[in-house]
Amino acid sequence: MIPPAVVAEVRRLLAEGRLSQRQIARRTGVSRGTVGAIASGRRHRGQPPRDTPPGGYPQGKPARCPGCGALVQMPCLACWLRNRRGGK
């Protein structure tokens, strides 16, 4: 996920109109595609993702997942995705 400060910087540089999207991408450290998506409004509208895992995104120290046994940051995204799709 791109930090909000970087998105704000990309928007500011786009609004100035002095740099190309390629130059903005180099300056901010994001891809040209991301700059284009921000410019067109397809990305970073300030809305949270539509579907997030219960408990939020993984963070903290890795631990063994009780569902699959993998060493992951909890909650285990692999188990969450597998359960969402109805797989085993």
Image: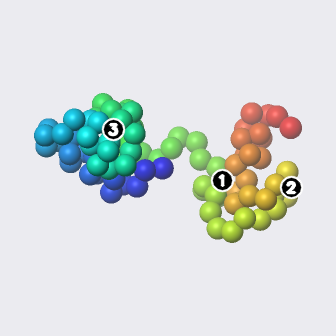
Q: Is residue 6 visible?
A: yes
Front residue of 7 and 55 = 7
Q: Residue at x 86, y 38 (%)?
A: 88
Q: Earlier in the sequence, mark 2 or mark 1?
A: 1
Q: Nearer the viewer, mark 3 or mark 1?
A: 3
Extreme-bottom residue of the structure: 61
Q: Residue at x 32, y 42 (%)?
A: 25
Q: Which residue is mark 2?
A: 69
Q: Which residue is mark 3?
A: 35
Left or right: residue 41 versus residue 72 is: left
Q: What's the mark number on residue 41?
A: none
Mark 3 near mark 1, Cβ–Cβ under 8 Å?
no
Mark 2 near mark 1, Cβ–Cβ under 8 Å?
no
Q: Nearer the viewer, mark 2 or mark 1?
A: 2
Q: Which residue is mark 1?
A: 54
User: What separation in Å lies between label 3 and label 1 (alpha carbons)?
Assistant: 30 Å
Q: Amino acid at mark 3?
A: Val
Mark 3 near mark 2, Cβ–Cβ under 8 Å?
no
User: What separation in Å lies between label 3 and label 2 (alpha carbons)?
Assistant: 39 Å
Q: Is residue 41 visible?
A: no
Front residue of 46 and 34 = 34
Residue 5 is situated, as x and y percent measured from the top left of the image, at: 33, 57
Q: Amino acid at mark 2?
A: Gly
Q: Report helix, strand or loop for mark 3.
A: helix
